[in-house]
Image (cartoon, coloured by chain):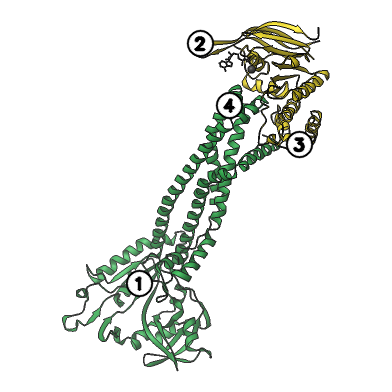
Chain colours: A green, B yellow
Amino acid sequence: MSFSRFFRTLSLALKSVMLHKLRSGLTMLGIVFGVFSVIAMLAIGEGASSQAQKQVLELGATNIIVRSVKPPDETSSSGQSGQSFVLRYGLTRKDLKVISETIPPILGVVPVRELTQEVRNKQYTLNARVVGSTPEYREMNHLKLAQGRFLTDKDLDEMANVAVLAHETAQVLFPFENPIGRPVQIGNRAYRVVGVTQDRTASAAIGGSLSGQDYNKDVYMPLPTLQSRLNTGDLFIRRTQGSFSAVSVVFDQITLKVGDTDETTDDQNLVIPTAEVVRETIRNLHGEGTNDFSVVVPLELLRQADQIRKIFNIVLGSIAAISLIVGGIGIMNIMLATVTERTREIGIRRALGARRRDIIQQFLTETIVLSGTGGLIGILMGLLTPTAFVGIQWFVDAYVMDRSTGTSDIGRLFSGMEPQIAVWSLPLAFGVSVAIGVIFGTYPARAAARLDPIEALRHE
Amino acid sequence: MPVVARLVDLKKFYDLGAVVVKALRGVSLDIPEGDFIAIMGSSGSGKSTLLNLLGALDRPTEGQYILNGRDTSQMTDNELSIVRNTDIGFIFQSFNLITQYTVLENIEVPLLYRPGYPPITARDRNRCIDVANQVGLGDRLDHRPFQLSGGQQQRVAIARALINDPAIIMADEPTGNLDSKTEEEIIQILTDLNNEGRTIIVVTHEPGVAKKTKRQIYMKDGLVAGEGVFPG
Ligand SMILES: Nc1ncnc2c1ncn2[C@@H]1O[C@H](COP(=O)(O)OP(=O)(O)O)[C@@H](O)[C@H]1O
Ligand SMILES: [Mg+2]
C-alpha cells in the first residue's frame, strides 16, 4: 500500500471516528483503562522492584546479617536459677569466633552492639543510638565522612575513648562549633569526637524483616570501648517502666560478608548456602530449640520482593488483559452497529467502484484508529502515574497523616512506592491496543465487505 | 457507430426458494456509442434489474453482457468493481450521496477507488471543481447534502458519475423524486452530456423525459416489448 493511499485510508477513518465523538470516546474507554492499568501496574511494579533493589544493595547483596533476638518466653533464657533476673540471649563471642574461623566463604565479619543512650555536650542533649563496631562498619553501611576520620583498628586495640558523630547528632550537640577534638558525654564518661559522617537518607525496612535505620542520629565508637565502658561486662542494666531488669547481650548484630577469592564465580550464589551453614552453626552452638537469633539474607529479601512483584504483576496483568478484551468486545460491538448503520454508505461506495478489500480496509482502519487512539490516551494517562503518586502522597501527608505519631498506614503504604515508567511497556501497550483493533475489527469489516452492493443500496 | 455494449439473451432470475422470480427473461440489445436510451415500462417489468446488470452491479443468471468488448458475466467481484469505477457512471433515484461528506468530497469518492490507487492530485481536484461547475454547483462545493435541494443533490450525483470519465452513464429514474422544473434541468444536463458524445441510458416513467432521448425501449414482464426512435 502506497503512503498516499495509507494516509487517505487513515484520514477517512479519522473523519468517521470524529463524526461521532461521544460514541467514539465511549467506545475507546475500555482500551484506555486497559492500557492505563497495564502501564501504571508495570510502573508500580518497576518502582517497587528498584526500591527493593536499592535497599538490598544498601544492606549488601553479598551480606548475611545475623541478629540477636530476645526470645519470646523467659524460660528460654540461659541464665541460671539464682540469677534469673538476668536475661542472657543472643550472639556470643564464641559464635563470632566459630563463624569467622570455620565457615570458608566468609570474607569479613562486622559485629555490632547498639544501645540507646543520652549523649550530651554542655546543655545540648540527644537520645542517640550508640553503636559499637569495627572500622569495617563504615563501608558496610555506606557511610561517608564529612570531616575527621572513622574508627580505626588502633582505636579498637587501644579501646580508645573516641566517638564518631552522625550528621544530625553533630548538628544537635555542636550547633555553633566544630565538634572535632571536642568531648561528648555518654553515660558518665567523656569521649573525644574524631569524625562526623555525612547526611544520609534513612533506609526503609524491607519485607518487615529488618527495621528501617535512621543513620543520622548515631554515635559510633569502638566495640570494645562500648562493651567495657557502657556495658559492664556484657551486662547492661536499664530501667524500664520503674523496675530494673537486666539483659545480657554481647552483639546485637553480626554482618558477614560472603565471597571467595575466585573471580569467576558469582559471589551471590554463595550467599544463600552460606547463610544456611551459618544458621546451622549457631543453632548447634546455642542448642536445639533456642531461637534467640535470626539470620537475614538481603539477597533472599530481594528474591522474595521479586517473587511478590511477579505475583502482583500476574494478577494485575490478568485484570488488565480482561479489561482490554472487554474493551475489544465493546469496539467490535460498536463496529457491528456501525456497519449496519452505514450499509447504505457501503452500497454507495461499492457502486462507485470500491472493492471488497477497500471496504475491509476502511472499517478495519476505523477500528484500529479507535483502539490505537484509546491506547495512546491510556499511555498518556499511564505516564501521569508517577505524578499522580506524588499528588496522592502529598494528599496523604496533608490530610490523612496521623498528626500525633506522624505516620499513617496509608502514608506508609504510599511512601514506599515510587512508580517508574517501564519504557518498554509503552510500545508494547500501543502494539497490544492496535492488535486488539485488528482482532476485534476483522469480523465487522468482513461483514461489511460481504454485503451485496444492490442489497446494501436498497437498505434504508 | 461502434457498439459500446451488447446484451445477448440476458436473463436474471431471483431464486426465492418457493418461487423463482424471472425478472429478465431474455433481453438482447445493442447500444452504440453516443446513444441516448430511455427504458420505459410499468413497475415490476424489470427495468431496474436490467439497469443493474448494465451497471455491473450484478451478474446475469444467463446470457452475455459485453461491455467495451469484455463479457461481464464471467468477471470476478473485483473486476466488476473496476468496471463500475472506470467504465460506468451511475445515477440513482434517491441520489445516494454520502451524507457526512461535502459536495466536493462526494464528487471525489470514485477517485478513491481507481485501479492502482493513484494519489489524488491537484489536477484531480481541479477536475472535480470543473465538473461541479459544469453541473452548476460551483458555489456549493463545501455544502453537505442536507443543505442542498433535491435537484442540487442529483447534480452532485451526476458530477460524481462523470468524474472518472466513463463510457456510459446510467440513471435509474433520476427525476423520480424531483419536481417537473428540476426534472427539466436534470434532463437538460443529460442531453448536454449526450451532445458531448456520451452514451446515456435512463430508466423513466415520464414521457416528457423519454421525448428528449434518441431511442425508447419498452419493457414488459422481463422482455423488451417494443422500441421506438424519437423523434421519428
Ligand atoms: N432482489 C430481488 N429478489 C427477488 N425479486 C426481485 C429482486 N429484485 C427485483 N425483483 C423482482 O423482479 C421484478 C423486476 O423488478 P425491477 O427490475 O425492480 O422492476 P422495475 O424497476 O421495472 O420496477 C419484480 O417482480 C421484482 O419483484
Ligand atoms: Mg425500478
Q: Quick one: label 2, few (<14), some, or many (20+) residues within 10 Å?
A: few
Image coordinates for residue B228, horizontal then vertical, percent: 75, 7
Secondary structure beneath dot 2 equals loop
Judging by the rendered image, the residue that carries numbered circle 1 is A100
**Quadrant assignment for ligand 1:** top right
Residue B27 shows in the view? yes
Judging by the rendered image, the residue that carries numbered circle 3 is B141
Residue A160 shows in the view? no
Judging by the rendered image, the residue that carries numbered circle 4 is A459
Quadrant including the C terminus of chain B = top right
Q: Identify the amino acid type marked 2.
A: Val
Q: CA distance from mark 2 to mark 4?
A: 23 Å
Q: CA distance from mark 3 to mark 1?
A: 92 Å
Residue extending farthest to the bottom is A122
Examine the image and state in which quarter residue B31 appears: top right
Judging by the rendered image, the residue that carries numbered circle 2 is B19
Relative to B28, does residue A371 appear above or below in the rendering?
A: below
Q: Nearer the viewer, residue A125 or A139?
A: A125
- Are callouts 2 and 1 both on one chain? no
Horizontal side of A15 relative to A52 (left or right) equals right
Q: Report the chain holding disc 2.
A: B
Q: Identify the amino acid type marked 3.
A: Leu
Name which of mark 4 and mark 1 comes first in the sequence.
1
Q: Identify the amino acid type marked 4.
A: His
Relative to A426, does residue A460 appear above or below in the rendering?
A: above
Image coordinates for residue A154, horizontal then vertical, percent: 44, 85
Horizontal side of B72 relative to A289 (left or right) equals right
